[in-house]
Image (cartoon, rainbow, N blue to C red):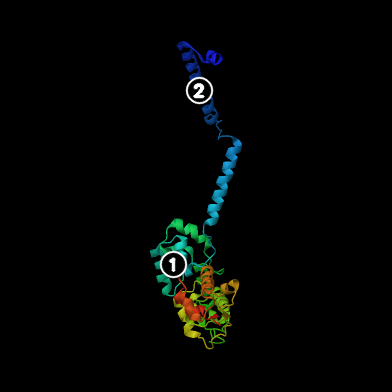
């Protein structure tokens, strides 16, 4: 007991010294521990390799954002639907103006006419007009007038009395589906360019089935089309080989002269939903289907 007592017996000043020493050791341990936990090395974010890596990440983000945007494919602006117009950024009023114009059985012939009818802004026109898909045979109005003037009649000028004598050409047929380019040229206002254009569009349609289809010929004015129909009629309707809407392939359906890419997608999506069309009239159930073109579209389709 004496041995133990000798080791633990201290006076007051010694106990105070030991107490202060213990406090100092504890404070020192706390300082060392906190320095280890919180004094991490700071990372320099301005290092070249880190900046290059961040730029690469930003580039990938921009590519992903661009890929998520809906892609625009070439299309005929005359057949823009509500859904398509909304995707392009057109307002409801602008879309309604185009639809009202189309109900008069007229077509816009250029991006300038499209803006005149719809009243879209210059910025929106510049954005979407590169995707407009117009027929290749668009020609200038003054060329048309020159051709029609030089090719419609054979003309001789009499210097003595200054009168013109016209020799009227005779047509080979009055059947609009059999008429030749020379036959159409006999109509006042139809030159070589427009006669070929009518024949080219007739081939695309596999023959005129409706008189109104003549008004769809690109750039042909209504007054001139009326003159054509006053001479040429649909004597025998063409025999069109219809395709089955339930088995037709996507590319084949796009060959329909009245179906664009967006409408083709809607028809296929609807067919997937209902398994198959029971009747061709079900096309009218498709949201955004152009009802004014139903009679024309179904000239080439059937449901079996």
Image location of residue 194, percent across then percent down: 53, 74
Q: Which mark is residue 54?
A: none
Q: Is residue 293 left or right of residue 246?
A: left
Quarter residue 99 falls in: bottom left
Image location of residue 16, percent across then percent down: 46, 14
Q: Single out the residue that lies furthest toward the front.
A: 1
* Quarter containing the C terminus: bottom right
Residue picked out by circle 2: 26
Select label 2 or label 1 by which is in front.
2
Residue picked out by circle 1: 82
Viewer-side residue, 248 vs 82: 248
Image location of residue 94, percent across then percent down: 40, 64
Residue depicted at 39% across the width and 64% down the height: 92
Q: Is residue 215 above or below residue 96?
A: below
Given contact means CB atoms under 8 Å apart, are the residues at marks 2 and 1 in contact?
no
Label 2, label 1: how far apart the Cα atoms are: 78 Å
Q: Is residue 198 above or below residue 40?
A: below
Residue depicted at 57% across the width and 45% down the height: 57
* Residue 162 visible, this angle: no
């Amino acid at each position: 007991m004496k041995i133990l007592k000798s080791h633990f017996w201290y006076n007051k000043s010694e106990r105070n010294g030991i107490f202060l020493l213990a406090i100092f050791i504890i404070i020192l341990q706390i300082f060392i521990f906190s320095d280890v936990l919180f004094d991490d090395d700071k990372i320099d974010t301005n290092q070249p390799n880190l900046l290059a890596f961040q730029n690469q990440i930003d580039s990938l983000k921009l590519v992903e954002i661009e890929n998520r945007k809906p892609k625009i494919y070439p299309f005929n602006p005359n057949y823009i639907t509500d859904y398509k117009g909304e995707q392009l950024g057109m307002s409801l009023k602008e879309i309604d103006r185009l639809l009202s114009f189309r109900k008069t059985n007229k077509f816009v012939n250029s991006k300038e006419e499209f803006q005149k009818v719809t009243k879209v802004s210059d910025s929106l026109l510049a954005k979407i007009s590169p995707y407009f898909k117009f027929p290749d045979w668009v020609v200038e109005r003054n060329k048309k007038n020159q051709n029609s003037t030089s090719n419609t009649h054979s003309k001789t000028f009499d210097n003595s009395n200054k009168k013109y004598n016209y020799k009227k050409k005779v047509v080979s047929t009055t059947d609009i589906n059999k008429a030749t380019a020379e036959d159409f040229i006999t109509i006042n206002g139809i030159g070589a360019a427009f006669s070929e254009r009518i024949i080219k569009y007739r081939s695309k349609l596999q023959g005129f089935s409706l008189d109104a289809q003549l008004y769809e010929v690109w750039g042909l004015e209504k007054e001139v089309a009326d003159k054509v129909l006053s001479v040429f009629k649909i004597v025998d309707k063409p025999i069109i080989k219809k395709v089955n809407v339930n088995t037709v392939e996507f590319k084949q359906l796009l060959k329909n002269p009245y179906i664009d890419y967006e409408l083709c997608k809607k028809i296929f999506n609807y067919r997937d939903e209902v398994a198959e069309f029971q009747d061709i009239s079900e096309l009218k159930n498709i949201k955004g289907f152009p009802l004014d073109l139903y009679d024309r579209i179904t000239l080439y389709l059937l449901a079996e």
